[in-house]
Amino acid sequence: MLRIRGSIGDWPVDLTLELDDGDWAKLGAQLQVSKVDGVEPAASAAAKPANPDDAQWQLAKALLRKSGQLSGPDLLEQLEGLTGSAAAGKRLLVRLRHCAEVKVLSGGDTPLYSWVEPL
């Protein structure tokens, strides 16, 4: 038997799962299958992007690095093309604004995004 207690927001949670020996064996087997050559799943997940957002983030940084410098509207347009979504493009633009390798100059009508190599 496995008991889980806690809350989800304001809702209390008290859940009891009854597992027989076969269920525990299946669960243990699944955990063993998740290991890759003795490396825990969390360690192997760090080696590659965990989801498409991480892949898009890497592509967005590469886009600005290759360009060197882009105006905000031009960069947003390219990010929207990269992601296929205006909302996802805006999220990447905000992430770039706060990225250590990116310098944003706010002058004139539009911000200017520049790639700066870390020291």
Image (cartoon, rainbow, N blue to C red):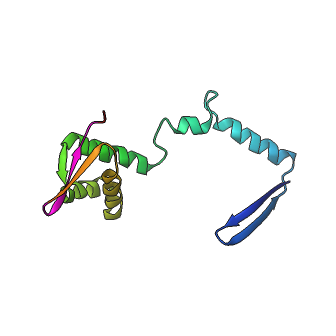
Q: Is residue 99 left or right of residue 8?
A: left
In the rendered image, residue 11, in percent from the top left (x then y), is placed at 69, 72
Where does the image place residue 74, in percent across and percent down from the top left? 18, 56
Residue at 87% x, 45% y: name it: 21
Eyeballing the image, is 88 above or below 23? below
Q: Position of 54 compared to 108: left or right?
A: right
Q: Quadrant of residue 81?
A: bottom left
Residue 84 appears in the figure: no
Q: Residue at x 74, y 39 (%)?
A: 29
- Magenta-drawn segment: 108-117
Percent x, y for residue 23?
A: 81, 48
Q: Which quadrant, please, contains the C terminus? A: top left
Q: Nearer the viewer, residue 83 or 87?
A: 87
Rendering coords of residue 30 (x, y %): 70, 41
Task: Please tell me in which quadrant of the rendered image residue 43 appears.
Answer: top right
Q: Is residue 73 magenta?
A: no
Q: Is residue 109 magenta?
A: yes
**Furthest-bottom residue in this view:** 10
Q: Is residue 19 above or below residue 46?
A: below
Q: Residue at x 78, y 65 (%)?
A: 14
Q: Nearer the viewer, residue 63 or 8?
A: 8
